[in-house]
Amino acid sequence: MLAELLFDFTRLSVFQDRLFRAGAASLFSAAVVLFVMPMLIRFSVRINASSDFQSTDKHPPSILGGFLLIPVVIISSLAFAKWNAEVMAILVIMFAFFCVGAIDDIAKIWNKRKVIKGVISKKDYQDKADGISARLRLVLYFIFSLAVAIFAYKFIPGMTGHLTIPFIKPEIWYPYLPNWAFIILISMVITSTANGANFTDGLDSLVSIPIITTSLFAGFVAYISGNAVFAHYFLIPYLPGIDELFPLCASIAGAVGAYLWYNSPPAQIYLGDSGSIGFGAAIGMMFILIKAELFLPIVGFVFLSEAVSVFFQMGWFKITKALSPDKRGRRLFLKAPLHHTFQIMWKDRFNSSAEVNSKIIWRFHLISVFSLILGTLIFFKIR
């Protein structure tokens, strides 16, 4: 890694300090994104790399943000974090899910061009918007997450099926799941977090703050858990080597923070499936490795609410369609994911759709911040 090479060359111990490497990773990611993103946006406008249809002369935001952010985070992490099994597991799962999302993003752009040329209709576009069907995508999610879960279980020291329960000290109750059950849990956490992040990426900057808050929580817990003295003081499991996730989490926070410069309303670019799915899967794996998987619904409450709204909407529609006499499905929410329900509910309360979206975005951001604070308090103190 770059930090190790700098230490060998200069013999300055600062290059081995984890706090310094985390800060350097964050600044490096932010600097690269701030410098390269304008070029990516100009390129995206030139090739019309969006999935929206718009009648005005202004170009809708591109969906290629993940094509820059994911590689930047991977490079920054490899440069400033030590290459242990924990770091490599997260980078592998991030890249694998990024590839799945990238296929979908490219398919959306390609099929939009077909609509413009008159080759297919807008209805056909909706049917062909994703390059990979939802069913096949879920299968790939589980295959990738299972592979990484088995790798982590086999090669990461101390990786066991023990679960940290909210509000309860591990010394009082530290339940254990058998190997097969824990591996299935890992796959479910990664898949659900990836989907939740993907559903959240629907309004300007909506997904950015939850990614930052969950990454900060994971990085902070990893830093504490990787130190025997700190872990003993806070009465949490000591996880040797897990503190190397701190530079990786800082890299994500730095990259997404710089991305907000261009993604803040009105957005110039979106993460797209490649970025939201990639970051979501990585966050899910982080919470598994720091033994905080049961805290993900608290810290990542926005992801959870968006994913649950879609799950219940689809499930309720299918159940009511099968059971109702007229064979017509009913909807539990006005529209899913959840932020679309608020768009419909509040459309008459404000002067424009932009004001409605702004209110939704800021309230979701505040929920993400409050969820971070609550999750941190519960994890370290309220037990």
Image: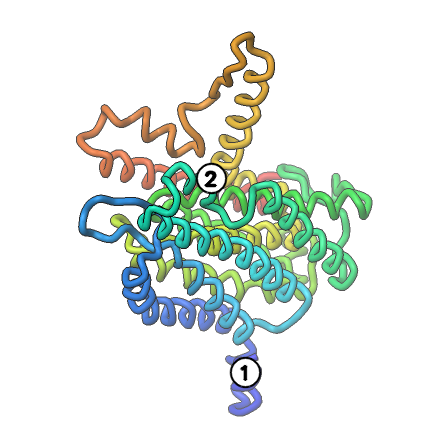
SS at mark 2?
helix
Please, what secondary structure does the residue beneath circle 1 have?
A: helix
Q: Closer to the camera: disc 1 or disc 2?
A: 2
Q: Which residue is mark 1?
A: 13
Q: Is residue 219 visible?
A: no
CA neighbours of label 1 inside 10 A, class few (<14), some (14 to 19), many (20+): few
**On the rendered image, what quadrant is the C terminus found in?**
top right
- Tell whether 113 sits left or right of 12: left
Looking at the image, which is closer to me, 118 or 353?
118
Q: Amino acid at mark 1?
A: Ser
Q: Residue 74: x percent and y percent? A: 52, 68
Q: Position of residue 53 (x, y in %)?
A: 30, 44
The furthest residue to the front:
119
Q: Does residue 243 lie above or below 171 as drawn?
A: below
Q: Does label 1 or label 2 sit earlier along the sequence?
A: 1
Residue drawn at point x = 38 percent, y = 54 percent: 63
Query: Where does residue 339 sit, x and y in percent of width and height?
Result: 39, 34
Q: Residues within 10 Å of mark 2 (few under 14, many from 20)?
A: few
Q: Is residue 141 above or below residue 73?
A: above
Q: CA distance from mark 1 to mark 2?
A: 56 Å
Residue shown at 30% from the left, 58% from the top: 262
The N terminus lies in which quarter of the figure?
Answer: bottom right
Q: Residue at x 43, y 39 (%)?
A: 124
Up the image or down, 360 lies above or below 290; here it is: above
Label 2 sits on residue: 127
Front residue of 313 and 166: 313
